[in-house]
Every structure is written in C-alpha cells, then in structure tokens.
Image (cartoon, rainbow, N blue to C red):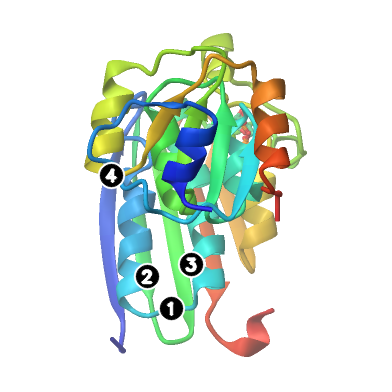
Amino acid sequence: MKLFELVESLSLDVKTPGADLTREVTGGYVSDLLSDVIGHAPEGAVWVTLQAHLNIVAVASLKGLAGIILANNRVPEEGTLKKASEMNVPVMTSGLPAFELVGRLYALGLRCR
Amino acid sequence: MTGNSDGVFFLTGKDFANAGSASSNLKGILEKRGIPAEIIRRASIAAFEAEMNVIIYAVAGMMHYTITPETIKVVLQDMGPGIPDIGLAMQEGYSTAPDYIREMGFGSGMGLPNIKRNADKLTINSVVGEGTTVEFVISLERSGR
Ligand SMILES: Nc1ncnc2c1ncn2[C@@H]1O[C@H](COP(=O)(O)OP(=O)(O)O)[C@@H](O)[C@H]1O
Ligand SMILES: [Mg+2]
C-alpha cells in the first residue's frame, strides 16, 4: 500500500509538505521507546508514536521507515518538522488514540514483519 | 568501492538537535561502499545507540570509523562521567537516565544490549570521572555470523 492511500483512508493530517507519499508502506510498528524502534521496527513500516521531538526523525531515517504517525493529536515540535523535511521523512498526525490507529492500520492489512 | 576508509564525527553532549547525524552519515558511507543491507542495518543500530549514549551521558566525544574489506570498526570515545559498573550497565533495562530523557523515549536500558546483539564484538573501557570508550566491530566476511 502506498503512503498516500493510507493518508486518505485514515484521514491523516500530513505535516511535511512535499514529503514523498508515493512510498510503499510494507508494515507497521508502534512504540514510544526509541531503542525499541531502532532495534525492532521493520524497514518500510509506518511508525505510530506519541513522541513529537526531533529525534524521532533520525530514528525513522536510519531505519528506512515509510513515515511517522503521531497519535492522539500530538503536535510535532517545530524542529521535528524542519528536520523531517530535510531528511525527507513524512510526518503525519491523527486525532485517533494509538490503539484505535493501530487497529485500523491492521485492518488495512499492515503487519509487523 | 574497495580498500580502507576511515573518518571521524564529533559529538556534543545534550546536542539533541544533531543527535543521530553521525550514525546517519556512517550509514550513507556504508551504502556507498555497497555493503549488504543486513550488515548496514546492524551497524546503524549499534552506531545510533552508542552515539546517543555520548549525547545523553557525556560532555563531548567522537565517533571514529574504519572500514576495511573485512570489517567495520566503530570507536566512540567520550569525556564524561564514565561507567562505574559495566556489567550492570550491560543488563537489559538498567538505566541511570534522568526523567526528562525517559520522557523522550530514551533511557529504556536497551542501548548497550542492542549494540551487543548487533555487533560481532563489543569492548567497553571506562574510567569514572574521565570518560568511556565503546568499540564495536562488525565482520563483513560471510563467516562473521
Ligand atoms: N557513554 C557513556 N557514559 C556514561 N555512562 C554511560 C555511557 N553509556 C552508557 N552509560 C551508562 O550505562 C547505562 C545503560 O546504557 P544503555 O544500555 O544505553 O541504556 P540507556 O541509555 O537507555 O540508559 C546508562 O543508563 C548509563 O548509566
Ligand atoms: Mg543508551
């Protein structure tokens, strides 16, 4: 599934204008612990988190993640969006709580592998 | 690209704005050399964890890498508080990170174990009150793992 399809079906708010939404999303991961994401998130996954600070961008970039979704209307910090644009990491937000968001991603066929 | 290459990145304690960029740069260098993705994945995990430890715990430090046809060697040397009990620090879940670091999602005590799991060799030397040197090696030869 392409990232833009995901954005559409979950009505995500894309916070990084110009980000590459044609990227293929091949899985999902949810965690607020950065060592957990660094150690275990599969490449190509979309990452659901409540962390909004700029170090999430380095983590996503290093792991080759397809994008980051901030749950529960978390507002990305200003530095986060600047870094995300520089490093071409799509950052999106959703009003849904993480549980709900992950459930819908799962229903769309995404898995953690 | 063949032959040897090496370089160094400088790290500043608490500089969260640039945290992770040494590891990102190293990843780019490994990709340019055409190193297999699975090895780059392991090297990136280990480098990021070691880099973050310097940013979080030390005053300043550097990441030095040496790539040969056989191995990737990364040495992180810092000026900082040092580690009083390395055995304890290696335990999964052990962390002395302050609350504000934990709130950022760091400080889960998985960093050093993550490095150990992903590197073929890990050596830690530390002097309390002076600093810490973390060295890890990843083998590029098939027999490595
Ligand atoms: N470079 C360092 N300088 C001083 N102490 C360190 C350093 N790296 C690790 N430590 C100590 O080892 C502990 C465990 O490190 P780590 O496994 O990376 O987990 P975490 O960083 O999540 O606490 C840290 O909480 C800290 O006390
Ligand atoms: Mg750590």
Q: Tell me how far mark 2 sits from mark 1, CA to CA.
A: 6 Å
Q: Which residue is mark 4?
A: A87
Whether the residues at callouts 1 and 3 have beta carbons within 8 Å, the answer is yes
Same chain under badges 2 and 3? The reply is: yes
Q: Tell me how far mark 3 sits from mark 4, CA to CA.
A: 18 Å
Whether the residues at callouts 2 and 3 have beta carbons within 8 Å, the answer is yes
What amino acid is labelled 4 in the image?
A: Met
- The image shows residue A51 at horizontal and vertical percentages of 51, 21
What amino acid is labelled 2 in the image?
A: Leu
Q: Describe the element under mark 1 as helix, strand or loop.
A: loop
What amino acid is labelled 3 in the image?
A: Ile
Q: Which residue is mark 3?
A: B40
Cβ of mark 3 under 8 Å from ligand 2: the answer is no
Q: Does residue B25 appear anywhere in the picture?
A: yes
Q: Quadrant of residue A58?
A: top left
Disc 3 is attached to a residue of which chain? B
Name the residue nearer the viewer: A69 or A32: A69
Q: Tell me how far mark 2 sits from mark 3, CA to CA.
A: 7 Å
Q: Nearer the viewer, mark 4 or mark 1?
A: 4
Whether the residues at callouts 2 and 1 have beta carbons within 8 Å, the answer is yes
- The image shows residue A55 at horizontal and vertical percentages of 41, 31
- Earlier-in-chain disc, 1 versus 3: 1
- Earlier-in-chain disc, 2 versus 3: 2
Disc 4 is attached to a residue of which chain? A
Q: Can you tell which mark lies on residue B35? A: 1
Q: Tell me how far mark 4 sits from mark 1, CA to CA.
A: 22 Å
Q: Which residue is mark 2?
A: B30
Q: Nearer the viewer, mark 2 or mark 4?
A: 4
Q: Describe the element under mark 2 as helix, strand or loop.
A: helix
